[in-house]
Amino acid sequence: MKPAISILMINRNQGRFIATAILSVLNQTNQDWELVIIDDASTDNSAEIIKGFLPNRRLKYFSNPRRLGIGLSRRQSVDLAGADILGILDSDDSLEPEAVDKMIEAHHRHSAGLIYSQLIVCDQDLRPLAAGRNGPIPATSSNLLLNRISHFATFKRAAYLRTAGYDPTLALAEDKDLYYKLEEVTDSLFINLPLYHYRRHRQSASSYGWRRWWALVQQYKVKYKAYRRRLGDPEKKIGLLSLLPQRWRPTGRD
């Protein structure tokens, strides 16, 4: 019998944190899940740590013999997953114990293809620093303008298959790229519960130094591609007014 949800985890040299990420899945209140871990040719002790959890049959582990990058690895993880609901957990972050239960319930109750929660921003020891900035997307706006979709992101496989999927060429911002694509084919739903702990640390892909600036470049790149897609589709065309911040748009009142 296939699980209710597949949690997808890509790892690259996060041996310092990955045990905590895996344990946060093992400790879920709802155990109807599988965890798909793809190690993207790590050079640290990640493989040794992951293998210590493999007696649990709900874990699927795959090791890339050479580095494929985050975009292609994400795409690979979707292909290997068995569930109709897919969720993303980075190998240096963690889930609240009820995260899986809340997401499965939401997907069964709502037709939205993309469902996401609030997050908690933490330091490298997972001590809370601040609440995340996720939120609902009004019907009159778009995530392209508001940038409110992030962790804990889950999506229905049926919705994913209506898109081009994860871009295998992307080294960063592959998640935002997919959220834009999903927004073009399905509705989204925000769960206002902090179900995800996002860890900030020096080795994270987009938090500090040049990585942060490079991440911003990649984010603008995928946003530009989304605008191009939507402008080419009459049913998804974005008018010039919609490019303005919400507070600057005319209200229609005299």
Image (spheres, rainbow, N blue to C red):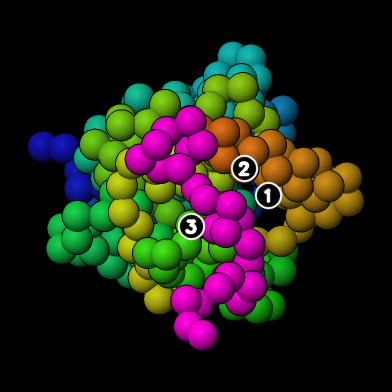
**Distance from the alpha carbon under mark 1 to that under mark 2:** 32 Å
Amino acid at pointer 3: Ser
**Distance from the alpha carbon under mark 3 to that under mark 1:** 37 Å
Instruction: Please identify the quarter of the rendering in which residue 199 is found.
Output: bottom right
Residue ID at (48%, 38%): 230
Q: Which residues are magenta?
A: 230-254
Residue mark closest to the camera, 3 vs 1: 3
Residue ID at (72%, 28%): 43
In this rendering, position of residue 78 left or right of residue 239: left
119 to 226, vertically: above or below? below
Amino acid at pointer 1: Arg
Q: Residue furthest left?
A: 1
Residue ID at (29%, 61%): 103
Question: What residue would you read off at disc 2?
Answer: 223
**Residue 163 image position (x, y, % from top left):** 37, 31
Q: Are marks 3 and 2 in contact (CB under 8 Å)?
A: no
Residue 253 visible in image: yes
Decide which of tag 3 and tag 1 comes sooner along the chain: 1
Q: Residue furthest bottom?
A: 254
**Residue 113 image position (x, y, % from top left):** 29, 49
Decide which of tag 1 and tag 2 comes sooner along the chain: 1
**Residue 5 image position (x, y, % from top left):** 26, 47
Q: Secondary structure at mark 2?
A: helix
Question: What residue would you read off at disc 1?
Answer: 16
Residue ID at (55%, 73%): 250
**Distance from the alpha carbon under mark 3 to that under mark 2:** 12 Å
250 to 223, vertically: above or below? below
